[in-house]
Amino acid sequence: MRGDTAAVASERADIAIVGGGVIGAACAWFLARRGAKPLVIEGAAVAHAASGKAAGLLSPLMPPADRETAALAPLTERGAALHATLAELLDGPGTYDYAPYESCAVARDADEAAALRERAEVVGGEWIAPEALADRCAWLDRPAAGGLLLRSAQLDPAKFTQRLIESAKGMGASLRTGRAAGLLGGPDHVSGVELEGGDAVTADATVLALGPWTHRAAAWLDLPLPVRPLKGQIVHLEPAAAPPPGGFSAFDGQYAVTKPTGIVYAGTTAEDAGFDDEPTPEARARILADVALRTSRLEGARVVDQTACLRPLSADGLPLIGAAPGRRGAWVAAGHGRKGILLSLATGEAIAELMLDGRATLDLAPFDPARFGA
Ligand SMILES: Cc1cc2nc3c(=O)[nH]c(=O)nc-3n(C[C@H](O)[C@H](O)[C@H](O)COP(=O)(O)OP(=O)(O)OC[C@H]3O[C@@H](n4cnc5c(N)ncnc54)[C@H](O)[C@@H]3O)c2cc1C
């Protein structure tokens, strides 16, 4: 950490936010809305990583490997409610393809059906018996043991993140391209960001929203902030015939969803591949084979694109939201795993409350960045 006096400050901000993904953008939006003047520092381009390539589904349902926990429920509920509010405020349907969305989580057998019914207690939804499945979810035309129908919404994550940044700029926020290389300050405080190339930004407070690159912030702060990249791939398909609306998900995390453009997103994978974010033919073949076990609706579909990106997965599956322990002036907003788009607004709101009011409306104790030790 470079000391305050050694800093060659080329810019000054009230609040510096490192990372222009959906989490940094949401923090900027809520801080600017409350009258602060945050500066977002993004190393590549806004939403160039997972925040621009995610499926954009706002359903709280997780694949079984990442079981929903009760701890996450208030944040997901608040996140979904804020998405509905902002969609009105920012013309979500017109500017970032915000649309209602219905998805059916399908059970293959009695065990999966029992597990899904149990999960309904956390995430809600309507249980659909096997004989009614094809009527209620036109995607599902293979034998199944029932399904959990959930109503939520979807959006285009790249357009959404851009829209948040543009709207925040309209309220006094600003954006700077630059890669953070360290932090300014001393052993007990942070007073800004050191950039690659020698520039620096001094700031009263700094939010670290680096997604899967949070290990860099951990090193700068000398704190355990265990967030690792988990690669996921999505195949974009143009179906031979008009696809059913909404989508479905399988018990093992596979899904298909019709986007408002008529293109179907089929996903996904969960690959421990470090920071490799290249799409692969093997993943494409696996995704297409898996969705074909649930539906015939994609037979003859043309692959128009394939993306790969990295989820920021924390060691306990819960996000890190709050003050960096022992480092006055530093805040962490990271580790949102598979649900960063859904959780972005509740996170931004909570960070703004913590920073400006000293406390948040939601109980953030389960997400305290200090929980991994000092
Ligand atoms: C295949 C896939 C599908 C998904 N689908 C959904 C979904 O349907 N719904 C949902 O809610 N979530 C979904 N997610 C999860 C969601 O995409 C992520 O949780 C979310 O995008 C994380 O946002 P973030 O801002 O924390 O990280 P990122 O989007 O990774 O942004 C971090 C930013 O920090 C910048 N950065 C890093 N280091 C530096 C530095 N040193 N200096 C400056 N800038 C830096 C990066 O350039 C990047 O732009 C999906 C993820 C994947 C992989």
Image (spheres, rainbow, N blue to C red):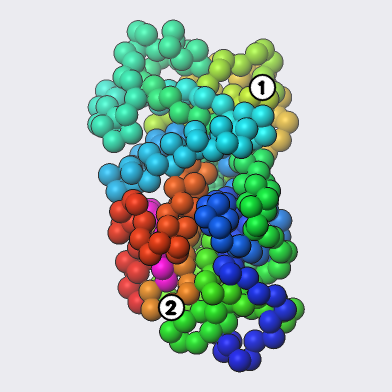
Q: Is residue 49 visible?
A: no
Bounds of the magenta segment: 316-324
Image quadrant in which you'd find residue 28 = bottom right
Residue 71 vertical position relative to residue 109 in the rendered view, above or below: below
Q: Closer to the N terminus: mark 2 or mark 1?
A: 1
Is 22 one of the magenta-colored residues?
Answer: no
Q: Is residue 9 left or right of residue 131?
A: right
- The x, y position of residue 366, in whole percent, is 31, 57
- Type of the residue with mark 1: Gly
- Residue carrying label 2: 327
Give 111 or 139, whichever is nearer the viewer.
139
- Residue at 61% of width from left, 20% of height from top? 298
Give 214 or 74, whichever is nearer the viewer.
74
Residue 66 vertical position relative to residue 318 in the rendered view, above or below: above
Mark 1 neighbour density, 10 Å: few (under 14) some (14–19) many (20 or more): some
Residue 330 vertical position relative to residue 360 in the rendered view, above or below: below
Circles 2, 1 touching at the beta carbon (< 8 Å):
no
- Residue carrying label 1: 262
Q: Quadrant of the C terminus?
A: bottom left
Is 323 one of the magenta-colored residues?
Answer: yes
Name of the residue lying farthest toward the bottom: 5
- The x, y position of residue 60, in whole percent, is 41, 37
- The x, y position of residue 336, in whole percent, is 46, 52
- Type of the residue with mark 2: Arg
CA gap, disc 2 and disc 1: 48 Å
The mark lying in front, picked from 2 and 1, is 2
Q: Is residue 90 left or right of residue 148?
A: right
